[in-house]
Image (cartoon, helix red, strand yellow):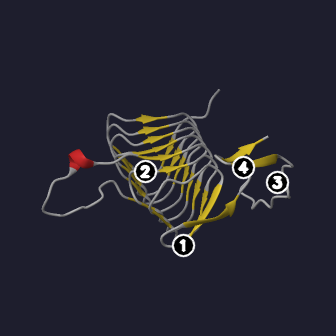
Amino acid sequence: MEPLVQIHPTAVIDKPCQIGKGTSIWHFAHIMSEAEIGCDCTIGQNVVVFPHVKLGRGVKVQNNVSIYTGVICEEDVFLGPSCVFTNVINPRAFINRKDEFKQTYIRKGATIGANATIVCGHEIGAYALIGAGAVITKDVKAYALMVGNPAIQIGWVSRAGLRLVFDSEDVAQCPETKEKYKLTDKGLCCL
């Protein structure tokens, strides 16, 4: 028998929305109508998931994260504590810009560090690692390691999230999983 959804009594769940089996929703979270949350997700304390957000299977959302309309996370994404998403480039309190929401894609296995900010309209590549406090203002390649404000790429990481060191033939091996990676003119690929 598959595990049921676990929802803390203080959480608010607006209908209609989709919540997959095995998902846990913790204290004071708010899932708004039309949100889609996959199976086996964890939604931490004080998390707000806005309408039309899509979270794939196995997404982990740490405490104090607001996921605004326009954000799409593929499976196995990690959203660190208090990370920030935007959905409008030039917000003004006195101008309604809901028709200008931009989509932000977080690809499979990517990690967004604590207190990082993701400016809307960009794509975070698969297995990329965004360092704590980084501010993303452009697309991020798969497996890229990004830090700073504005964020810059300082290296590459494996699927396990470990920094890669390349040999003279532009091949690296993950010290944990032993997977090999090749650096190409289009970025990084797992061999």
Dot 4 or dot 1, earlier in sequence: 1
Residue under label 3:
172
Amino acid under disc 3: Ala
Amino acid under disc 1: Gly
Who's the residue at 39% across and 43% down the image? 53
Residue 137 is drawn in which quadrant? bottom left
Check disc 1: other Cα within 10 Å, few if <14, some if 14-19, many if 20+. some
Q: Is residue 120 above or below residue 5?
A: below
Q: What is the spatial separation of the Cα atoms under label 4 and label 1, in whole angstroms? A: 21 Å
Element carrying mark 2: loop
Q: Say which of 8 and 88 sits in front.
A: 88
Label annotation for residue 13:
none
Check disc 3: other Cα within 10 Å, few if <14, some if 14-19, many if 20+. many
Residue under label 2:
9
Q: Say which of 164 and 59 sits in front.
A: 164
The answer to whether mark 2 and mark 1 are in CB contact below 8 A is no
Residue under label 1:
148
Q: What is the spatial separation of the Cα atoms under label 4 and label 2, in whole angstroms? A: 36 Å
Dot 2 or dot 3, earlier in sequence: 2
Element carrying mark 4: loop
